[in-house]
């Protein structure tokens, strides 16, 4: 273990170097390779599994904090195409993945992080323990397209950003396999969900909490006008901010893929 006075003098970059080295030594025998702050491996040929070390957020003035980002990338789900992309890159970043979370959100249920002013070896051991207990079982469970199609919904904490896109992404997998019938069925199921969500927001709006004096500016989907709401007291207000952007995107994507949208 580092002498306390020694690790107290480390920069955040030096601390992450130590942490990443220890974690990589654990993951390397499992087929992972290191590229900068990203540790990556391919499974099922071209599906990426990613562990990424994020050293703060300097653009927002956040320093001495480490987040561990996790991801799984299925190419056709990200690229929105039925064709195979070649050649593969050597590795993919976590932000290029379609199934994503952070280690804290996965394990703690919240966006927890590590304080880089503390012992980096102790931090690394905790990360390794958490990866072994919580991350690798999910990587193994979702190590193929068949497995992702069957079991993705079991791991909602690992799917923080795109779980509402599962039907569309499953459609992309079937489309790549050449099963246009199933791809079309799933695409339309996603489309109808998106349409229902749009109509619901258009009719009933969303309840949004504002503190007293807080102001929100938004485009009202009902009136097609920009509105400003300033809260006279703390509480919920109704925002009619329904947006057709995703439906327009889906219409364009359907044409590109050769998928027919069912008429209601």
Image (spheres, grey):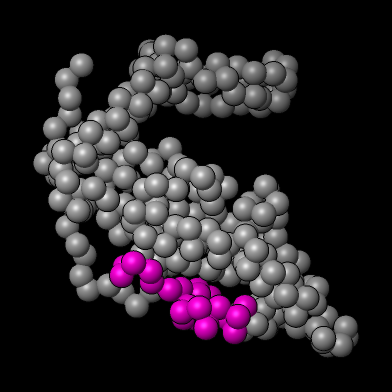
Expressed as whole percent of the image width and height from the top left, the position of residue 201 reads 43, 19
Expressed as whole percent of the image width and height from the top left, the position of residue 167 reads 34, 38
Q: Give the magenta-colored segment's residue range.
A: 23-46
Expressed as whole percent of the image width and height from the top left, the position of residue 188 reads 25, 31
Which residue is drawn at the image coordinates 52% and 20% (left, top)? 206
Q: What is the quadrant of the N terminus in the image? A: bottom right
Residue 252 in sight here: no
Which residue is drawn at the image coordinates 66% and 72% (left, top)? 128
| 43 in magenta | yes
Dividing the picture into quarters, in which one does residue 74 lie?
bottom left
Q: Is residue 58 above or below residue 253?
A: below
Dividing the picture into quarters, in which one does residue 42 lie?
bottom left
Which residue is drawn at the image coordinates 27% and 72% (left, top)? 88
| 5 in magenta | no
- Camera-side residue of 201 and 25: 25
Expressed as whole percent of the image width and height from the top left, the position of residue 212 reads 72, 22
- Camera-side residue of 210 and 78: 78
Dividing the picture into quarters, in which one does residue 254 lie?
top left
User: Viewed as shown, does residue 200 lie left or right of 181?
Assistant: right
User: Viewed as shown, does residue 125 lie left or right of 24?
Assistant: right
Residue 145 in sight here: yes
Which residue is drawn at the image coordinates 50% and 75% (left, top)? 39
């Amino acid at each position: 273990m580092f002498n306390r006075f020694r690790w107290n003098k480390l920069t955040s970059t030096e601390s992450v170097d130590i942490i990443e080295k220890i974690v990589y030594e654990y993951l390397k025998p499992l087929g992972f390779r290191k590229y900068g702050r990203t540790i990556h491996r391919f499974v099922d040929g071209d599906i990426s599994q990613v562990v990424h070390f994020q050293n703060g957020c300097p653009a927002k003035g956040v320093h001495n904090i480490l987040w561990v980002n996790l991801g799984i990338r299925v190419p056709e789900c990200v690229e929105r195409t039925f064709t195979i992309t070649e050649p593969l890159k050597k590795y993919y970043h976590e932000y290029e993945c379609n199934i994503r979370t952070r280690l804290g959100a996965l394990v703690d249920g919240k966006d927890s992080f590590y304080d880089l002013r503390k012992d980096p070896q102790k931090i690394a051991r905790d990360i390794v323990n958490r990866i072994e207990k919580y991350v690798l079982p999910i990587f193994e469970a979702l190590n193929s397209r068949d497995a992702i199609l069957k079991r993705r919904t079991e791991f909602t904490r690992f799917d923080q950003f795109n779980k509402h896109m599962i039907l569309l992404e499953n459609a992309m997998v079937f489309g790549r396999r050449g099963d246009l019938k199933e791809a079309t069925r799933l695409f339309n199921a996603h489309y109808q969900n998106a349409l229902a969500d749009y109509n619901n927001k258009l009719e009933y709006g969303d309840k949004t909490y504002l503190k007293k004096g807080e102001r929100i500016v938004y485009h009202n989907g009902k009136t097609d006008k920009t509105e400003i709401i300033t809260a006279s007291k703390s509480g919920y207000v109704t925002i009619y901010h329904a947006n057709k952007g995703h439906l327009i995107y889906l219409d364009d994507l359907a044409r590109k893929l050769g998928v027919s949208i069912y008429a209601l």
